[in-house]
Amino acid sequence: MTDEEKELISTRLGLAALLIIMIASFLVWELYPALTSILSMAMVALPRQARLRLCMPLPWVLAAQTAVVTVLHTLGILVGAYDLVWWWDILTHMMATSVIAVAANLVITVRGRNATPRALPVKYVPLVSLGLVIVLGMVWEVAEFSADVFLGQMTQYSLNDTAVDLSVDILGGALVAVVIPPYLERLEEDYGICEVSTSSAR
Amino acid sequence: MRKVILNVVIPLLFFISSLASFIQYEGGNIYWPAAGLWALALAVTTPRCLASAPVPAAAAGLMLLAPHLVAIIDVSAAPDVQFVLLPAVTFLLAYLTLSFLLPALSALLSTAFIGVSALAFYYLDRIAGTSFIPTNEAFMLHITAGLIGAFIMYLVFYAGLRMEARA
């Protein structure tokens, strides 16, 4: 089985699971997990779209991990796992961050090659990606805080919860920054640069 | 004269400003000395980098001194000046650190600095029993201010680059 086929299977399984969660959410009239599952479907489709439209074949494990983390997140909201299982939050944050970090590393590598005034050296890519992951973690926390303040939600439980979330984000980003350099160095020169073939889009 | 300003005056101003940032005021911004430490590291390790980017270096130096200048008139206003200027200072420090990269990356690094510093102070509170960040609201205030400030600095620098390209 090729990597592309594995990616396709992971994507389809993820979409199917999210569809089930979405239907279940509507059945019990829980709008938050329903809307989250719709957004998650778009995220699950991203690795496939990156391959087909941006010429950026991501590791199939990334597609599988995206599917798993979005399913865990929406399921967690629906069944209240975030309240019942203390490590659920840590698990989803860590997984989501590592997915974003890998994607960020690849995108920054491709964009960095064409950066002006000069190309971004590959050795700086993990550092820049780590910065991006930290900032995205901060943006996420600000979004949660805003939802709590302006929409009366209860997404941030305490200072401890916020700080642990951000710490786990940084840990996931740092882990990827340590592991990914050999993979980036092995990427071909024309990675992310090709003619977009619409006929191959499925 | 120009050479003296570039190679001596600006690095010296930057060095003195970084040291001055360790002088704290009551209710002063907790991140200010951390930014000062970053500036001090730059002043000591890469003084040439400061000479090659004199405008951001001089601006960062003056901004680090600004709370003290304001304190001459009104001491109670110094912490507010620190709070407002912190994102600008960290952006300029990031710009000097990554002077060969794009302004967007400087905004990224300065924001990440504030996020990591906020966490560092949180853990310091937990370990040492201090109360730099007593509540979730205080934590979010620092993070939000950092994000907004870095974004504004990015816009300012981006507009500057666009104008430079047109001229």
Image (spheres, helix red, strand yellow):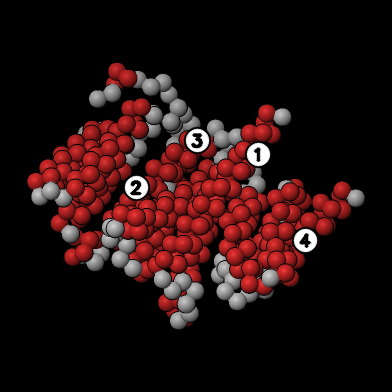
Disc assigned to residue A99: 2
Camera-side mark, 4 or 2 = 4
Camera-side mark, 2 or 1 = 1
Disc assigned to residue A23: none
Q: Is residue A43 above or below residue A33?
A: above
Q: Amino acid at mark 4?
A: Leu
- On the rendered image, what quadrant is the N terminus of chain A found in? top left
Q: Amino acid at mark 3?
A: Arg
Q: Is residue B85 above or below residue A11?
A: below
Q: Which residue is mark 3?
A: A111
**Chain letter behind tag 3:** A
Q: Amino acid at mark 1?
A: Gly
Q: Are marks 3 and 2 on the same chain?
A: yes
Camera-side mark, 4 or 1 = 1
- Residue in the image at 61% along x and 54% along y: B88
- Residue in the image at 36% along x and 27% along y: A53
Q: Which residue is mark 4?
A: B13
Nearer to me, B32 or B74:
B74
Disc 4 versus disc 2: distance between alpha carbons? 44 Å
Q: Are marks 1 and 3 in contact (CB under 8 Å)?
A: no
Disc assigned to residue B160: 1
Q: Are marks 4 and 2 on the same chain?
A: no
Can residue A187 be seen here? yes
